[in-house]
Structure formats: C-alpha cells, structure tokens
Image (cartoon, rainbow, N blue to C red):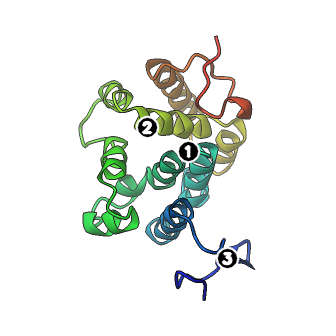
Amino acid sequence: MQKHDLPPAVVGGMLLPLPEPLSHDWMALHRAIEFAAVTYQGCVDKAGEPILWHALRVGISLLPDIDAAVVGILHDVWEENPDLDRDRLADALNGDHGLDIDILELTRQPGEPYPDYIRRVARRPRARLVKIADLRDNLDPKRLARAVAAGANQEEMYRLQGRYITALTTLGWKSVDNSPSTNGREEKG
C-alpha cells in the first residue's frame, strides 16, 4: 500500500503506482476517478460506450485545472444516478462545497428548458468551462458516427448537434472546430 493507504491505480489492466506522497491534487483526481468508476458503472451513451469514457475525456481535457477536471469527471453523476446520496458525492469531493455546487449546476432539472439550463450554467465560470468541454466531446464527429452506427437516429443526432453548437455560442465559445489545441478554454475569433 502507498503512504496514504490507497491502492495503486489500475489503468488498462496495468498496475501503476501513484505518486508518493500523494499531493492534494492527486488525491482529488484519484477520488473523482474512483467515484466515477463506481457511479457510472453500467451507464452507456448513445453509441453503447461507457459514460465513464466520456466523463474521463471531459475531465482530462480540462487539465491542468484540477478542480475543473474533477467536476468534468463527475459532471454527469446526477443525470446518470438521480438517487445518488449527496453525502457520498461530498465525500468524493473531500467536502469541497464549491465543486458540489458546480456539479449540481451542470445537472439539468426536470422540465427545465435547455436554453435556460445553458444560461444558468454560463453564470458559474468553472461549470461553464466543464460544459464547453462536455459539448465539444459530444460534438466529436467520431463519437457521433459511432452513435449512428449503433442505431441512434441520424436526424436526432443532427438536431442535437445544432443544439450543442447553439449552446457553445451561448456559453461564449466562438469556435466549433473542436480542435484539441483550444482545450475548451481559449476562444477563437
């Protein structure tokens, strides 16, 4: 066992040692990934792929901002598990109430019109960054093609694309080229 009594990370079936001693940032990421792996278990996207993969891509795209990466990894926990115990999430976030609020802000409420939801998210800077990263991942052409190949309605996917592009504009992001170099933070224009 490591100094903090955490097991080494398992990535792609390989055991990787965690840094010794674990910094606060490494601990936060480790807890978020571990919590996400359990919480998203069995949840899949329109392509039939684990939601965990999407959540990890969103989180990783926000590094080196650790707090944003943690929120990115956990941004869909309420959507995928509406009965989630809030205390469990608070434990995973090490009691950081600000991160908890960002995750709640990223959860669309029942009956909430999508444009209202996006405007609400836009008012919290970290939630805004995470939502931009989320939408950019959702707009990945390869991901969309896999969803259609798995049986998602192509017209519905085009409709969602338009909605996501409009949301990015509302969030103040001026480019939808989805290039990794912008990392969801820089605006082109």
Q: Quadrant of the N terminus?
A: bottom right
Give the crowd class for mark 3: few <14, some 14-19, many >=20 residues within 10 Å. few
Residue at far left of view: 111
**Circle 1 is placed at which residue position?**
65
Q: x%, y% of residue 133?
A: 56, 37
Give the crowd class for mark 1: few <14, some 14-19, many >=20 residues within 10 Å. few
* Sequence order check, earlier mark of 1 and 2: 1
143 horizontally vs 38: left or right: right
Residue at far front of view: 21
In this orientation, which residue lies closer to the viewer: 145 or 106?
106
Residue at x-position 29% and y-position 29%: 113
* Secondary element type, mark 2: helix
Asked if the residue under mark 2 is in contact with the one under mark 1, i.e. CB atoms within 8 Å, the reply is no
Residue at x-position 50% and y-position 18%: 169
Give the CA distance from mark 1 to mark 2: 10 Å
Residue 49 showing in the rendered view: yes
**Circle 3 is placed at which residue position?**
10
144 horizontally vs 38: left or right: right
